[in-house]
Image (tube, helix red, strand yellow):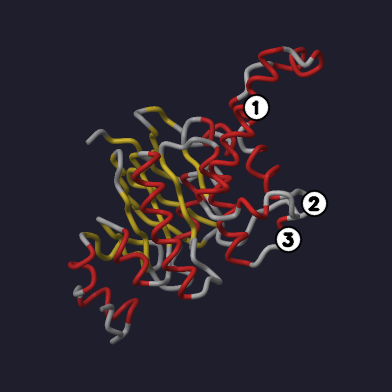
Amino acid sequence: MSVLLNVNQMTHFFGGLRAVHNYHLTIGSGQIIGLIGPNGAGKTTIFNLITGVYTPTEGSITLENENIKGLETNEIAARGLGRTFQNLALWRHMNVLDHIKMAHYSQLSYGLIGAFFNTRKCRQQESEIEENAYRLLELFDIKEHADQLVTNLPYGAQRRVEMARALATRPKILFLDEPTAGMTPDELVQMIKIIRQVHRDFKVAIFLIEHRMKFVMELSEHIQTLVFGEIIAQGPPEEIQNNPEVIEAYLGKEDLA
């Protein structure tokens, strides 16, 4: 298993507040890793630090042995790190199909002249983009909504649009920030199936934040538990499920089974 992402001794301060302390992460090709912790633990901050929304105060971040610390978010995405957001980041004026097509455009090579003269290369690449967009819509069971404004869809379907858009960037690693937020139990089961299919068919590594323990335990092969910006436990799901520190700090006395 080759290492895709390596985060070492990452620490970050917001003013005088230390939000993340000495955080470590290694993601290998094909892995699914979960990040859990109570509200305010710093989970989304870690996503934002790795994906370029913030620049860490200390530490290093490499993607396939290339330093990405301090790069812009679009530069990091172009190098193979895609993500979704805890709060939906969709364009209200755009239909579902155009959301997915737009995510492909960083991969185009026909240029401004090709677009102006509608060259053969332009037509070919645009055709390939539309074909791939429809494949993703079908995978996420939202093909029937292709021409609808995204704001007209149910919340769970909007979540699937955002995930399809992230996958359209052809990432090597996909960061999912609470992908089942707002979903019904039936939608949660469907999302588990979709993520397993994405993982299998696209050969993509996945790093996910999620509050629903059923979701994390079923999908993840390795789980980190974060409290006040620090890892207090990590390991396979069965080990985390029975870890006294995790139960006390995050789960209380709830049974994960």
- The three-letter code of the residue at mark 1 reads Ser
Q: Which mark is residue 127?
A: 1
Give the answer, above or below, for where 243 lies relative to 27: below
Residue positioned 21% across, 60% down in the render: 236
Q: Which residue is drawn at 47% across and 39% down?
A: 81
Q: Is residue 253 left or right of residue 98?
A: left
Q: Where is residue 32 in the image (x, y as percent from the top left)?
A: 32, 51
Quickly name the residue at label 2.
93
Q: Residue at x 34, y 71 (%)?
A: 214
Q: Nearer the viewer, mark 1 or mark 3?
A: 1
* Quadrant of the rendered image containing residue 144: bottom right
The structure residue drawn at horizontal position 58% and vertical position 45%, both measured from the top left corner, is 165
The location of residue 139, given as percent across then percent down, is 50, 49
Q: Name the residue under label 3.
A: 151
How crowded pointer 1 is (Cα within 10 Å; few <14, some 14-19, many 20+) is rated as few
**Pointer 2 with pointer 3, Cβ within 8 A:** no
Kindly indicate the quadrant of the structure image that contains residue 41: bottom left
Q: Which mark lies nearer to you, 1 or 2?
A: 1
Task: Out of 166 and 44, give the one closest to the viewer.
Answer: 166
Locate the N terminus by quadrant.
top left
Q: Which amino acid does label 3 sit on?
A: Thr
Q: Which residue lies furthest to the bottom in this view?
A: 253
Report, in whole angstroms, how far the alpha carbon at label 1 lies from the one at label 2.
23 Å
- In-front residue for pair 178/148: 148
Distance between the Cα atoms at labels 1 and 3?
26 Å
Q: Nearer the viewer, residue 51 or 90?
A: 90
